[in-house]
């Protein structure tokens, strides 16, 4: 336990959370989100059959359907807490990796393997370029981190401008690829890296950005309690597998309804 003394002498106890603890948390909320999508939305509700208007009408006539839809939405919201954790762990992985190229290649392979089931689940096609899975976003973030690291010794106005340009370039790339969680993930990774030593500023900015997915700020309690310890009891390949599965899940069911199609013919 960490002991923190407040201004009025109040002692606060916060748990010690390792990298494995954050990984476990992310895996659990991913699992909850996946169950909400696969079991409730697709298995019980068959959400793809509804438009927003027809779903609202059906729920007004069927209380069971309304309950299931509410539970599914809550499970989706819980999944939003995984985004800041993945962004934080990506930065930690970058800082601690002994082989950046291998790290990037593993991420890219996971992204490619995840793309086919992602396209089948979202668009019903084996390959579709209208939207890409979240692992693509993480690959772009890794490249952004490498670029930031190359210019980390550049200070002053020039250094600040270079960081901004690198950030803009990363945002442009995730927009071109239409990668899932693109803007939110890029901004979070940038904040975690650039403001590493400024915990309060990093947390405030991160919470504001994470509001894009409503429940994201809750995850910052675990990030704040992070000890920096990396026991790696959870195999990194297992983590990549979970991340790949998570990348095949879209947050918020309204995006998969007929009235708001994702794919382009």
Image: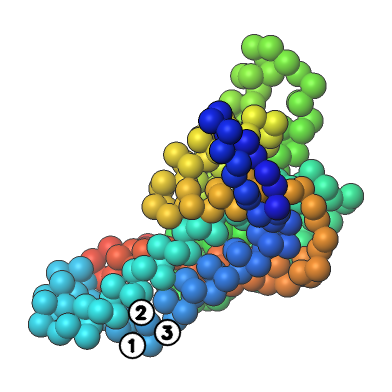
Residue 92 is situated, as x and y percent measured from the top left of the image, at: 74, 47
Pick the residue in front: 142 or 197: 197
Residue that label 1 marks: 44
Which class describes the residues within 10 Å of circle 3: few (<14), some (14-19), or many (20+)?
Answer: some
Q: Are marks 1 and 2 in contact (CB under 8 Å)?
A: yes
Q: Is residue 140 left or right of residue 130?
A: right
Q: CA distance from mark 3 to mark 2?
A: 6 Å
Query: Residue 31, image x and y in percent?
Result: 54, 74
Mark 1: secondary structure? helix
Choose between 73 and 43: the one closer to the eye: 73
Q: Residue at x 64, y 26 (%)?
A: 163
Q: Which residue is mark 3?
A: 39
Q: Are marks 3 and 2 in contact (CB under 8 Å)?
A: yes
Q: Which residue is mark 2?
A: 41
Mark 1 vs mark 2, CA separation in Å: 6 Å
Q: Nearer the viewer, residue 60 or 106?
A: 60
Q: Are marks 1 and 3 in contact (CB under 8 Å)?
A: yes
Residue 143 pos. (x, y %)? 70, 43
């Amino acid at each position: 336990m960490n002991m923190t003394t407040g201004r009025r002498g109040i002692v606060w106890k916060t748990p010690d959370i390792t990298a494995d603890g954050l990984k476990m948390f992310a895996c659990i909320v991913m699992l909850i989100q996946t169950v909400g999508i696969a079991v409730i939305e697709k298995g019980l509700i068959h959400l793809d059959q509804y438009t927003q208007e027809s779903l609202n009408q059906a729920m007004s006539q069927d209380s069971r359907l309304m309950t299931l839809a509410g539970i599914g939405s809550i499970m989706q919201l819980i999944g939003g807490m995984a985004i800041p954790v993945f962004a934080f762990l990506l930065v930690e992985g970058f800082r601690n990796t002994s082989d950046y190229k291998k790290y990037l290649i593993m991420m890219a392979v996971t992204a490619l393997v995840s793309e086919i089931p992602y396209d089948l689940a979202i668009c019903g096609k084996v390959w579709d370029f209208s939207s890409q899975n979240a692992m693509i976003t993480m690959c772009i973030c890794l490249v952004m981190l490498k670029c930031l690291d190359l210019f980390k010794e550049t200070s002053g106005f020039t250094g600040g401008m270079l960081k901004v340009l690198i950030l803009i370039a990363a945002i442009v790339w995730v927009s071109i690829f239409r990668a899932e969680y693109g803007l939110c993930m890029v901004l979070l990774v940038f904040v975690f890296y650039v403001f590493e030593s400024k915990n309060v500023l990093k947390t405030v900015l991160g919470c504001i950005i994470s509001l894009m997915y409503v429940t994201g700020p809750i995850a910052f309690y675990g990030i704040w309690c992070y000890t920096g310890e990396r026991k790696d009891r959870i195999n990194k390949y297992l983590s990549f597998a979970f991340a790949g599965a998570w990348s095949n899940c879209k947050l918020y069911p309204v995006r998969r309804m007929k009235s708001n199609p994702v794919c382009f013919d």
